[in-house]
Image: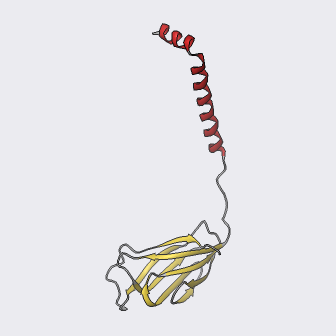
Amino acid sequence: MRSSCRTVRAKNPWLFRVRDLVLTSCVLVTAFFACTPEPTGPGPPGVLHAVLTSPAGAEGAAVLELTSAGLGEVTPVEGRVFARQGAGVVTLIIILDEPGEITFRVSVADIRSPPTVTVLEVADGDDQLRASLEGYEVQFDLEETL
C-alpha cells in the first residue's frame, strides 16, 4: 500500500500541493467567518410594518395586544386604529373600511426586537367574530422608505 502512495506522489507531486492549498484555504475561510463579530447591543430605532396573517381570508377588524419596551406610535396602513398604551403594552383595535388584509406600522426603539403580539379578537368582513383564533399571527418587516 505504501509503495502505491509513493508512486502516485512521485508521478504527480503537484496534486498534493493543490490538495494542501485547498485545505489551507478552507481552514482560513472558516476561521475568518468564525471570527466575524455578530452585532451586539440594541439595534437602531425605526418603524416596523406589521401584517396580520389570516387563515380565513379578508378581515374587517382585529383587537391586538403588543408587548415590548420602547413602543411608539401605531398607525394603520388602511382603516382606523384605536390604541390604549400602558407600560410596555399597547392594546390596538384596527377597523377596516372594507374587508381585507389588516396592516399597520409601529415605531420601536429597537428594530431587531419586534414586539410580542397576542391576537385577542378578529372579526370577519360582516363584523362577526371569528370562532377560532387558530392560525392567526402578526409578521413584522422593516418599513421600507422611499
Question: Measured along the vertical axis of the image, is residue 84 above or below residue 25?
Answer: below
Q: Is residue 108 left or right of residue 5?
A: right
Question: Measured along the vertical axis of the image, is residue 47 above or below residue 35?
Answer: below
Query: Residue 14 at x, y = what percent?
Result: 60, 19
Residue at 48%, 10% in the rendered image: 4
Q: Quadrant of residue 128?
A: bottom left
Residue at 51%, 85% in the rendered image: 92
In the image shown, does 45 or 7 lie closer to the viewer? 7
Query: Residue 93 at x, y = what percent?
Result: 49, 87
Q: Is residue 135 left or right of residue 69?
A: left
Coloration of the structure image: secondary structure
Residue at 49%, 7% in the rendered image: 3
Question: Measured along the vertical axis of the image, is residue 14 above or below residue 131?
Answer: above
Q: Quadrant of the N terminus?
A: top left
In the image shown, does 146 or 103 lie closer to the viewer? 146
Query: Residue 97 at x, y = what percent?
Result: 46, 92
Give the residue at the far top of this rendering: 3
Residue at 63%, 44% in the rendered image: 33
How many numbered marks does the figure carry? 0
Query: Residue 63 at x, y = what percent?
Result: 45, 85
Give the residue at the far left of this rendering: 131
Q: Quadrant of the C terminus?
A: bottom right
Q: Is residue 88 left or right of residue 62?
A: right
